[in-house]
Image (cartoon, rainbow, N blue to C red):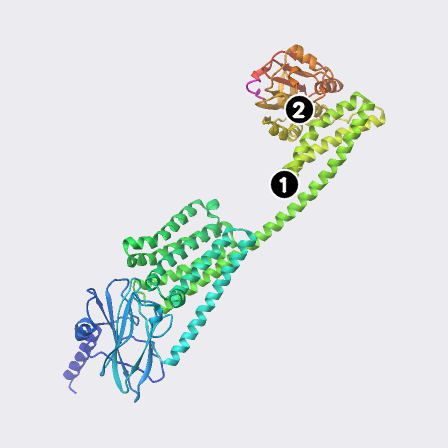
Amino acid sequence: MFEGDRWVSVFAALLVVLTLAGGAFAAPPALTLPPGEPIRDFDGYIYQYEDASRDLTLAEVSGRADDLLTLVERGEPGFGITPDALWLALRVANPAGEPQPRVLHLQTNFMIDIAVWFETADGVREILRQTPTSPATSRPIPHPNLAATFTAPAAGEGTIWVRYTSRGSTELPIRIETPESFVAVTQNQTIKHFSVYVVLAALAVVGLVAYASLKSFTFAAYAAFVGSVLLYLVQRDGYGFQYLWPGAPGLNNFFSLPLGAGLGYFAMLFGRSYLDAPAKYPLIDKALLAAMAISLCLPPAALIFGETAMKSFATVWVFIVSVGLMAAGVVAWRREGRRLAFFTIGWSGIVVAALIVFAREHGLDVSRAAALDSIRTAIVLEAVMMGAAVMARIIDIRRERDRAQAERLEALESNLGLHHRMNDLERLYEASERASEEQGRRFADATHDIRQPLLALRLAVRDLRGNARSGSEEVARVENGLAYLETLVGEQLDQSLRGDPSRAAAAADRAPVAKIIASLDDMFSAEAVERGLTLRAVATTAETTAPPMAVFRIMSNLVANALKYAKTGGVLIGVRRFDGRRHLAVYDQGPGLSADDLAAVMRRGARGETSAGSVGAGLGLSIVTELAAEHGLALIARSAPGGGSCFAVAIDPAPAALEIAGGVDDNAASTPAPVEPARA
């Protein structure tokens, strides 16, 4: 061959290749059907045409095939989301000397309108037709996917023609199976799908059982999420139309949108609850609420903007939501640790699957089956990871409950001990009452002082009985009151038994006044609340060289009187300087007394005119006077009718004196006097 002829031949061959690559339908190659083997690779054999008019017939498309049809650039035909009518053509050849029965397996569960013909030299035969009103029972093969049988003629050829429209995805993967391979594929597919369904159903039941036993909304949200995943997959795989709503093709076509929106809604509901977003992540919570609202709006929006447009938007929306939830999981994981690992890993799988689908819609060469398998795998992985997250949450709740139970038992044991001590104190109280009849004035004073802390203890113990998990603050308050009573009663009984009324506990060199004020606050705060009053104690760093128990007894009588007669307003306790000396003072906003009445009530058994209806023996102020005299503590008593009262005791021993005045500094009747923290 001459050199020039060789280049002419090369040029001619190149021209043929370019012509075929350009999509001309002239002399398309026929796909050979090997006897007994399925065909699943169709690269270079399927031709397509997009009919915007939706009016062309098979005869018109077949007659103008050279002008209309172009080669599908990838193995699986697809036109994106479009309302146009779509045409496919596939030539097949049977080299065998006998006819070959085959199954045309279209790997999609539904098309709104589809017709399939098989054209041979003997004519055209319709092998599949489904319209918008065709029930699932009208399919030539009862299968969750569209499938039909045809027979390739012996040593002959034929053309498979497909016309369809879709309101969602237009991808139409084609497989040509033998009857035997179709049965095997169907069985494997059914086993795979229903294994997933069983796992999801079990996870949903676990969520419901956890909710029933633990009463946590997170588990109910998880069960709803897994249930929505299960229903979505059943519809997506075609079993919903085959078994659940076989007579509602229009509903089946629309179902993918509300089921997908519901899946997203319940996923975000579960994420919101699991992350405790309202309390811990308010910004994330607002974003989730907005996304949930958008998901609920997708189905009704399809009535306005069209089902096709909303399904196209839903593809992007799923990707956005999955990325948002994964980002929320990452934020929570960094803050709270391993408990959020399962949540984040689960959503990362959904992000990958959504990214594959999104990229495939924009040209990524991935088969529809692979994309669907990635979605199914990601969804199942997510459900399992969320289940693991739920189990981790259950373990955390169990640990919290065990810890709470241990605290409860400890509190009950502590309360039981307090009750025993309370009973012992009640017996001591009865003994002190009997002794007071025999010993006279001293035990009358002691029983008077016991009454008020017992009232405070009864209020505190009543609260403890009502709440077995009382905190350490309440228990400490009761312990302080019990310690005071035990000291007071023990001291008085010891003096009585020894026959030495002058014995008293030795005072410490210096004692902090703050402890006395804190004990007064603990003892009387509950009573103040009961009476609707405000009890304020002002902090101080002052110290006293007087016996702390004596100062405490004096002040407890003064505070008890202040609470008794102050009908409204508040009572104030704190250190105040009077005439250059430090005093522990109590102010009240009661009715007040005149100077004569004030001097009278300081006598033993005397009660003021304003005490009518109140409980008491009139011993409080006389006890205060006698204790002050016994320990060399100066007293100040100031009051005025309608102007409140102020009583104060010097916190350092000095020649005992009682100063009575007819007025109250700082207008105590309207506003308690400001107390200046004393310098030690």
Q: Is residue 306 covered in magenta? A: no
Q: Which residue is mark 1?
A: 467
Q: Residue 453: which quarter of the image?
A: top right
Q: How many marks?
A: 2
Give the residue furthest to the bottom. 97
The type of residue carrying mark 1 is Asn
| Residue holding disc 2 | 560
Q: CA distance from mark 1 to mark 2?
A: 27 Å
In the image, is residue 628 above or below residue 406? above
Indicate the position of residue 241 as horizontal and vertical percent values.
37, 66
Q: Which mark is residue 655?
A: none
Q: Amino acid at mark 2?
A: Ala
**Segment tinted magenta in the rendering:** 668-674
Give SS at disc 2. Answer: helix
Toward the viewer: 63 or 574?
63
Local crowd at mark 2 within 10 Å, few (<14), some, or many (≥20)?
many
Q: Dot 1 surroundings within 10 Å: few (below 14), some, or many (20 or more)?
A: few
Residue 653 location (% of width, % of height): 72, 19
